[in-house]
């Protein structure tokens, strides 16, 4: 008799909880990440983009952070945490001083260096972690 695998329903609150969990672990807990209530979490239905991070500004001033993750792509907690951690690296690049993101470049050298820290601690698949878009 086979075992029927159940998928869970992804919710913004589930994304918030995954963020909070990861924020309590290295290297995120040393990066002064924003509180989960300062980040907007969105569940998308994208078939092509697993997740994204966006920084919202009003003019030249910072307004808020957004992390979105696709319910069509995420079916396990492992995948959710992997994608969330990836997007958290993007968020950290924006809040670090000085910023380490490069306009027009999604995964620059700094992203890869920070990703190496996350992958080493959490034992994520390095190839998958770097390729998530």
Image (tube, rainbow, N blue to C red):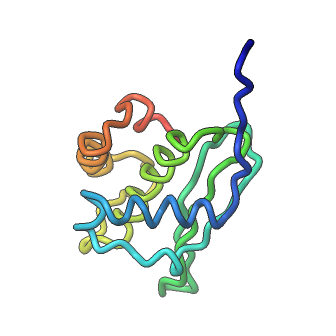
Q: Nearer the viewer, residue 66 or 121?
A: 121
Q: Quadrant of residue 29?
A: bottom left
Q: Quadrant of residue 97?
A: bottom left
Residue at the extreme top: 1
Query: Residue, x 32% and y 43% (percent of image)?
Result: 122
Q: How many numbered markers are drawn?
A: 0
Q: Nearer the viewer, residue 52 or 85?
A: 85
Query: Residue, x 67% and y 38% (percent of image)?
Result: 73
Residue 10 lies, in percent from the top left, at 69, 53
Q: Nearer the viewer, residue 39 or 108?
A: 39
Query: Residue, x 42% and y 61% (percent of image)?
Result: 21
Residue 64 lies, in percent from the top left, at 54, 79
Q: Is residue 62 above or below residue 120?
A: below
Q: Is residue 26 left or right of residue 16?
A: left
Residue 76 lies, in percent from the top left, at 59, 39
Instruction: Report the quarter where the N terminus lies.
Output: top right
Q: Nearer the viewer, residue 131 or 32?
A: 32
Residue 99 lies, in percent from the top left, at 30, 68
Q: Is residue 123 left or right of residue 17?
A: left
Residue at the extreme front: 1
Instruction: Report the quarter where the C terminus lies.
Output: top right
Q: Is residue 2 above or below residue 108?
A: above
Query: Residue, x 38% and y 68% (percent of image)?
Result: 94
């Amino acid at each position: 008799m086979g075992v029927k695998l159940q998928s869970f329903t992804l919710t913004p609150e589930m994304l918030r909880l995954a963020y909070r969990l990861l924020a309590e672990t290295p290297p995120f807990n040393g990066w002064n990440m924003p509180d989960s209530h300062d980040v907007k979490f969105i569940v998308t239905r994208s078939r092509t983009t697993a997740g994204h991070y966006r920084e919202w500004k009003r003019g030249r001033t910072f307004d808020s952070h957004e992390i979105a993750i696709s319910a069509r792509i995420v079916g396990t907690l492992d995948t959710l945490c992997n994608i969330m951690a990836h997007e958290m690296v993007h968020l950290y690049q924006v809040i670090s001083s000085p910023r380490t993101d490069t306009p027009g470049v999604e995964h620059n050298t700094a992203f890869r260096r920070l990703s190496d820290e996350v992958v080493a601690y959490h034992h994520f698949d390095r190839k998958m972690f770097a390729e998530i878009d």
